[in-house]
Image: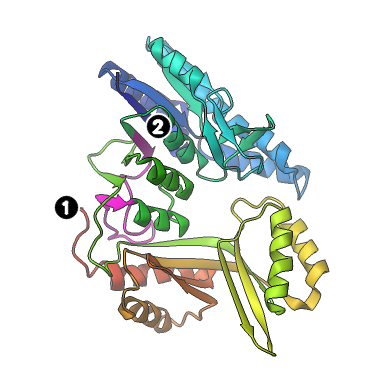
Amino acid sequence: MAIVVQKYGGSSVSDVARIKKVADRVAAAKAAGKDVVVVVSAMGDTTDDLLKLAREVTDSPARRELDMLLTAGERISMALLSMALNARNVPAVSFTGSQSGIITNDAHTNARIVEVRPFRVQDELERGKVVIVAGYQGVSYKREVTTLGRGGSDTTAVALAAALDAEACEIYSDVEGVYSADPRVVEDAARLAELSYEEMQELAEAGARVLNAQAVEFAKERGIVIYARSSHGGPGETVVRKSPPRAPGRVVGIASETGLVVLTTRTGLDGLTRLVDILDKKETGGKQLHCQEWPGMGGSASVVLSLENMHAFAELRQELTQTFGNDLMLREGVGAVSAVGAGINATFANLKRFLAVLAGMGAPLIGLSTSSFRISALLEEGQVEEAVRRLHAELVARAEPTAPGA
């Protein structure tokens, strides 16, 4: 029997009424002759509420204990959904990440999946049961409970789909697929009917919230097709798969994020080496890195960090200040806005239009970086939303529609 993996985000299971609607959808898939594995996030704002509790206890909660705390949210969702299905006479069983065979490295609060051993999942599917799996979590090779970072439930779903040789991985959220910009910021944002793995990964890395970047990376490696859909119904969806390249220079979307910090050392390569040593010890990854050296004149180096998965920033800031003193500049309240598209920098045309938009709104650049798929600018957080609207109007809205009827 064909296996389908469905993932439901926090908004889809935010209360009992919505959990019951998810149970109805899962029951319908089972009645249609599918073997169904469901991955769930924590209900609504449960993870944020648990983080708030931890920070009321201490400004720098131990990462291991954070993982023990935060994984409780998904366990609540999985148990309630299993109860709802059993109440509908649909046999179901719930598993934590460790029970379902999600093996990770030992990087607490930001672990990566290294292996999936879905033996118990397969056994229960053969018994005719729907299997509910707690997303966002796993167990390390040291048998420690770990979490996968924000959006990690997507990664759980794709990893299980690959390990089970599923025919599809369906990601359900509160929007119909992926849009050319956040619809809450840009009213005329268009749904994207299809995206390549590379385009989706760049959008996710740049702050688009519908899919997790690590999940897309996993899907690309294993050839898993992802369907991004709304849990509230509606015909729209975005399909993410290996796709033929678009016309070079076509901008498919504008993404943004806030809560960034820029660390700049005035001691060039030597300072960068010391800086990344500290970040590595703190298990803190950088989003961007820049370094310049001038013979006989020294140099500078910068690293961009996201506060999203950083739970002890005050402690890190103190250590950096003690180590570097006045040789380190730390800038908070930074955001980023990015234009994404295959071959976006094949010429300088898109870059010139991008910079002209920012200049027109009087937004001074904190930083700029490019790749074959992306142009990204660092700005003050308060300027990000307006930059998204203007860049979308200039680089995306003037192009042909990317989704029929969107």
- The residue type indicated by label 1 comes to Pro
Residue 361 in percent (x, y) is at 42, 80
- Looking at the rendered structure, which numbered label has been put on residue 161? 2
Residue 15 in percent (x, y) is at 47, 30
Query: Does residue 384 appear to the left or right of 190 in the view shown?
Result: right
**Majority SS type along the magenta span:** loop
Toward the right, the furthest residue is: 322
Toward the bottom, the furthest residue is: 296
Residue 263 in percent (x, y) is at 66, 70
Q: Nearer the viewer, residue 113 or 192?
A: 113
Category of crowding for the residue at label 2, using alpha-carbon neighbours closer than 10 angstroms: few (below 14), some (14–19), many (at least 20): many
Residue at 26 percent of width and 68 percent of height = 248
Residue that carries the numbered disc 1 in the rendered image: 404
Q: Quadrant of the N terminus?
A: top left
Query: Does residue 246 appear to the left or right of 171 in the view shown?
Result: left
Q: How is the image coloured?
A: rainbow
Residue at 53 percent of width and 22 percent of height = 95
Residue 319 in percent (x, y) is at 79, 62
Category of crowding for the residue at label 1, using alpha-carbon neighbours closer than 10 angstroms: few (below 14), some (14–19), many (at least 20): few
Q: Splitting the image into 4 quarters, where does residue 89 fall? A: top left
Residue at 51 percent of width and 24 percent of height = 78
User: Which element type, helix, strand or loop, lies under badge 1?
Assistant: loop
Query: Is 188 in the magenta?
Result: yes
Q: Nearer the viewer, residue 32 or 12?
A: 32
Tell me the magenta residue range: 169-196
Q: Quick one: label 1 or label 2, which is nearer the N terminus?
A: 2
Residue 286 appears in the rendering: yes
Query: Is 170 in the magenta?
Result: yes
